[in-house]
Amino acid sequence: MENLVPILFVVAIFAIFYFLTVRPQQKQRKAHEEIMRELKKGDKVITSSGIYGQIKRVDAEAVSLEVESGATMVIAKGNILGKVDSAGSL
């Protein structure tokens, strides 16, 4: 019984680590992947660098984004944080 206590302690530490760090990251990654699959022309989005724009074209790895000034830029699809509503919030 005394030899079992340290092993249970280590298992408990790994379980806590998993539920506090690994699992939430997996959920967040899955949610981001779902957003990437649902992107379509006309969606208003924000990029990881804080640029707001409207999608003009979606490719497998890139997105053509029109910003407020009318300029169009091509960015990596993974750099999109999410869709924004008309008020500009995620």
Image: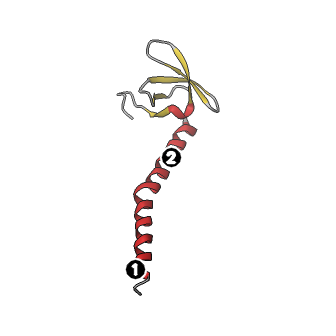
**Disc count in the image?**
2
Residue furthest to the bottom in view is 1
* 77 lies above or below 65: below
Nearest to viewer (mark 2 / mark 1): 1
- Residue 74 position, x and y percent, is 57, 22
State whether residue 68 is above or below residue 27.
above
Quadrant of res 68? top left
Helix, strand or loop at label 2? It is helix
Rendering coords of residue 80 (x, y %):
49, 32
Q: Residue furthest right?
A: 60
| Residue 4 placement, left or right of 56 | left
**Which comes before the other along the chain, label 2 or label 1?**
1
- Mark 2 neighbour density, 10 Å: few (under 14) some (14–19) many (20 or more): few
Q: Position of residue 11 (x, y in %)?
A: 45, 71
Q: Residue at x 41, y 27 (%)?
A: 50
Amino acid under label 2?
Arg
Residue type at mark 1? Val
Residue at x 42% of width, y 60% of height = 17
Q: Quadrant of residue 89?
A: top left
Q: Which mark is residue 5?
A: 1
Q: Which residue is mark 2?
A: 29
Is disc 2 in contact with disc 1, using a CB cutoff of under 8 Å? Answer: no
Q: Quadrant of residue 86?
A: top left
